[in-house]
Image (spheres, helix red, strand yellow):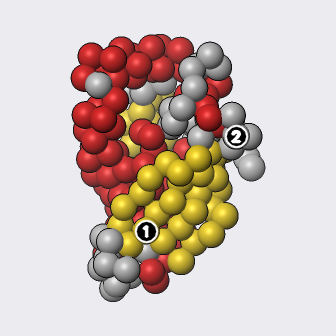
Amino acid sequence: MQPQLPIEVDAESGVWTTDKLPMLYVPRHFFTNNHTAVEAALGREKYAQILYDAGHKSAYYWCEKEAKQHDMSGLDVYKHYLKRLSQRGWGLFSFTEVDAANASASIELRNSSFVLQQPEVHGKLCYMFAGWFAGAMDWVSDTTGNPRKSVCSETQCGGEGHDHCVFTVKSLSA
């Protein structure tokens, strides 16, 4: 994997962009500390649902913008999404199985930023990504003429002692 991202910084505004999308760049501990503070305040179940819905919307939007930016379509956009997530420090993401026609996939995550930042915490720590993967799959489904809604869950986490995390995307109409 090529680790470099095309990062541009506007000299006048200080805004960072990658592929013409505005970006923020923060230390992993800063993000994780904020994430766990909100989780503690709201409770994991409520916070996870908020993140799922927001992540779904954001991934769908990202796929739409990147498809136009790079003249890509279908599953190529989803693969590009996993590549970009991997390049941004969240961990290393890859499909172990994918069937776009049936809106299903299995995604492996190695070196999750949440697991690496919280080595003393146990359990499923990476649930924030689930909505992202359903949103990207829904975008693929909607734009390839096979509109199906999907759902995703973290089915295995490095925070449970596994060497990697697994996310399972399934069609709601299956």
Name the residue carrying label 1. 170
- List x then y, in percent, for residue 29: 53, 15
**Foreground residue, 55 or 1?**
55
Would you say residue 13 is visible in this rendering? no
Residue that appears at 53% across and 67% down = 105
Q: Pointer 2 and pointer 1: residues touching (CB < 8 Å)?
A: no
Taking the spot 38% from the left edge, 72% from the top edge, the residue there is 171
Residue 49 place in picture, x, y as percent: 28, 41
Looking at the rendered image, the quarter that the C terminus falls into is bottom left
Foreground residue, 22 or 125?
Answer: 125
What is the number of callouts on the image? Answer: 2
Real-space CA distance between mark 2 and mark 1, rounded to the nearest whole angstrom: 22 Å
Q: Is residue 118 visible?
A: yes
Q: Nearer the viewer, mark 2 or mark 1?
A: 2
Q: Nearer the viewer, residue 37 or 139?
A: 37
Q: Residue at x 32, y 45 (%)?
A: 52
**Position of 25 relative to 130 (above/below):** above
Q: Is residue 156 above or below residue 25?
A: below
Provide residue 108's location: percent of width, then percent of height: 64, 53
Kindly identify the amino acid type of the residue bearing the numbered disc 2.
Answer: His
First in residue order: circle 2 vs circle 1:
2
Disc 2 on helix, strand or loop? Answer: loop
- As drawn, 14 above or below 97: above
- Identify residue type, mark 1: Lys
Label placed on residue 114:
none
* Labelled disc at residue 162: 2
- Callout 1: helix, strand or loop? strand
Sort mark 1 into few (<14), some (14-19) or many (20+) by Cα contacts within 10 Å: many
Q: Residue at x 32, y 71 (%)?
A: 172
User: How dense is the environment of label 2, judged by Cα within 10 Å: few (below 14), some, or many (20 and up)?
Assistant: few
Looking at the image, which is closer to me, 165 or 15? 165
- Looking at the image, residue 152 sits to the left or right of residue 145; the answer is right
